[in-house]
Image (spheres, rainbow, N blue to C red):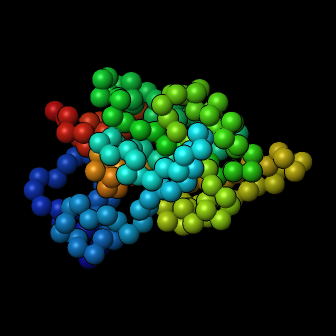
Amino acid sequence: MGIAGLIGACSGEKAQFRGVDITGIGAAQANDAQNAPNFARDLGLTDHNGQVRPIRDFAGKVVIVFFGYTQCPDVCPTSLQELAQAKQLLGRDGERMQGIFVTVDPERDTPEVLKAYMANFDPGFLALRGTPEQLAQVARDFKIYYKKAEGKTPTSYTMDHSAGSYMYDPAGHLRIYHRYGSGAQALAADAKILLGKAG
């Protein structure tokens, strides 16, 4: 069965997401809408406050995960700004949306740097980091790409990386993929659906 078949196999009326509906893709039982996909299963990295953060920590919230790095010139700040705007668009329900930023540059992105960076967008957002080995494992699980691009000096390198966002429902199931540039309105609209507030 192809991706279209897997997406269409959910019982009941299909939600009209603005992002790409990846509910249950690759799951063993395609007819079960709540089956977790066989990728992007969990995080298990440490946040900028020193606490290990699995997805289950955010039960009851829509979680949006984005990979990037603090010295990213445009893609990362744009995406995080859209995420902050989406939270504002949700009004009081914004408290039930959790932004997660996973650094692909743990060498330069220390907990202190990450905490300050998150404060530029929303103090409630969390940044996660891990060892190079942990990051490689999580990147494989999320099917994201990242690679160091050497600069003129050892510390002036940049990081090429995937730029989409993953959205989890309040039960911790991966549901939607948003491509870079989807916009705050699309993020907020899909978050509302997952929170049961659409309409």
Q: In the displayed structure, does residue 186 sit left or right of residue 135? A: left
Q: Residue at x 64, y 30 (%)?
A: 116
Q: Quadrant of the C terminus?
A: top left
Residue 58 placement (x, y as % from top left): 38, 44
Direction left: furthest residue: 12
Residue 122 placement (x, y as % from top left): 51, 28
Location of residue 173 by image quarter: bottom left
Q: In the displayed structure, does residue 88 sit left or right of residue 30? A: right
Check the image and report above or below for 88 versus 35. above
Q: In the displayed structure, does residue 121 sit left or right of residue 91? A: right
Residue 84 placement (x, y as % from top left): 46, 29
Location of residue 139 by image quarter: bottom right
Check the image and report above or below for 118 versus 128. above
Direction front: furthest residue: 51
Q: Residue at x 37, y 36 (%)?
A: 97
Tally the numbered discs.
0
Check the image and report above or below for 58 versus 13. above
Q: Is residue 83 visible?
A: yes
Q: Residue at x 25, y 43 (%)?
A: 194
Residue 165 placement (x, y as % from top left): 46, 48
Q: Is residue 163 visible?
A: no
Q: Residue at x 33, y 71 (%)?
A: 26
In this view, the residue in front, 134 or 89, is: 134
Q: Quadrant of the N terminus?
A: bottom left
